[in-house]
Image (tube, rainbow, N blue to C red):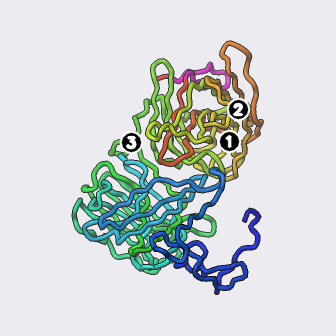
Amino acid sequence: AVNDENRWLCPNNSFNYGAPFYGECSPDGQRVRDQYSIFSWSPGPRAHVGYYIAKGEDEGLVKVDTHNIRGRDRANGMALESADGKTIYMTGHGRDIWNYDDDFNFKADEIVEADFTAVVKVGAQSTASPQSWSKSGLMVRTDLDPKSAHFSIYKTGAKWICTQGRRNNGEYSRSFSNCVENQPDVAWLKIEKRLDEYTTFYGMEGADGEITWTKHVSEELPGIGDSSYVGLAVSSASYWQLETVFEDFEISQYYFPSAAPSISSAPTMLAPFTDINNLDLGRVSQSSAGSWDVTSSGADIWGSSDSFRFVNYTVSGDVTIEMKVDAFEGDPDHSGYLHSWAKAGLMMRDTMGKNAMHYSLFVTGTQGLANQWRECTGCNSGHSRTHSDNPRPVWLQVKKVGNVFTSYFKYDEEGAGWTQFGATKTMDFGSELSVGIAVTSHSWGRVATLSGTDFSIEENDVPARKLRA
């Protein structure tokens, strides 16, 4: 298995999902029967069987929380997330998302209290019992009660695109428009909220990666309220589980000029921040003494795209940024959980795109200091790191002279000078760039907090400016 050799073959190249785990397959392709285990059967062909896969957490899948909305006591399911946070494998078993109460599996990590746009790519759907009215897609929901008001767009088992929901709590479900039939090529779904107006879209991805969006339904729905759960919904419409692969799930909130309140503490004029491909959990705060607390969720700053909170300022020319990091802590609502590759520190970035070029110096959860970069838009990231020791406080510095970027650190304010660290990189960011403080928890639904002081930006020959409230 490690070398991906000697794969088993299946009769007629078809895996039998009614025979869990082995699918009646074998090393030579001959049909093999009665080797499966269904845990609710007793004694069953093979009773009391457990299957285990050993793989490093950073390489494998991580179980994430879901909500079983049980309108008729049938719903269950789970979700696994890839290490980079880009893919979610989600199962859902339930009667339906319909009638007066819903029965399905729902993944929503936080209540959203702002205007937003939610987007997801719906990938493969697999089940042992295909149903035309199985549903996988995006949902906005007042609360977790089975009778809650909601507005949702699904891809069904029949490959239809449907916008359905409930205007107010306790009402009968409705379709807000005719379903769009026979859409096997549609992979992308989107919901926009602007005040009380909700709009659904479906999209097809071209060979160049561009998505062509088609508007489906727009509705005024004050019954959902000012705050709601936004997430992924799966219902098999049967006793069997439906597994759906979701990719690139993203919620972007609008802080201005939205009339809806923001989920985060409002920043001062001196603390602009941008949530890049982020779930928008967290806050940014300053004190008059120059201390900073920056809290964020996010999948990671790595690979070909990033997901993090960025306290950012626009500069031009040569620039030096510095900060003293006093602490980097995990989520208090999850027993202080801090991923080993959670990251926080200083960043210089070409644009606000999630796949933009950048040069950064971070403290991490347990991986020491990390100097990371992306040398072209959409390229994979590179990095250098220290040993896993993480002493605090630590002073960080990133410099840009011409198109040359370097990073430095020190552990003693009054002692030895700066120590150069990591890689010197030459990159062309254009005439302007964004610099500031970047934080990612490396874990959707959990936050990490950077606490520090003396954040400063020095441009060319202009004296360094301390950023204070």
**Residue 204 percent across, percent down from the top left:** 53, 69
- Magenta span: chief secondary structure: strand
Choose the circle earlier in sequence order: 1 or 2: 2
Choose the circle earlier in sequence order: 1 or 3: 3
**Whole-Å distance between the Cαs marked 1 and 3?**
32 Å
Mark 3 highlights which residue? 263
- Residue that appears at 73% across and 31% down: 401
Kindly indicate whether the residue at mark 2 contacts the one at mark 1 (C-beta within 8 angstroms): yes
Kind of element beneath mark 3: loop
Graded by Cα atoms within 10 Å as few (under 14), some (14 to 19) or many (20 or more), the crowding at tag 1 reads many
Q: Is residue 326 magenta?
A: no
From the viewer's perspective, tell me whether residue 225 is left or right of residue 80. Answer: left
Kindly indicate whether the residue at mark 2 contacts the one at mark 3 (C-beta within 8 angstroms): no
Number of numbered discs overlaid on the protein picture: 3
- Say which amino acid is labelled 2: Lys
Residue extent of the magenta highlight? 453-467
In the image, residue 252 above or below residue 363 = below
Report the quarter where the N terminus lies: bottom right
Kind of element beneath mark 1: loop
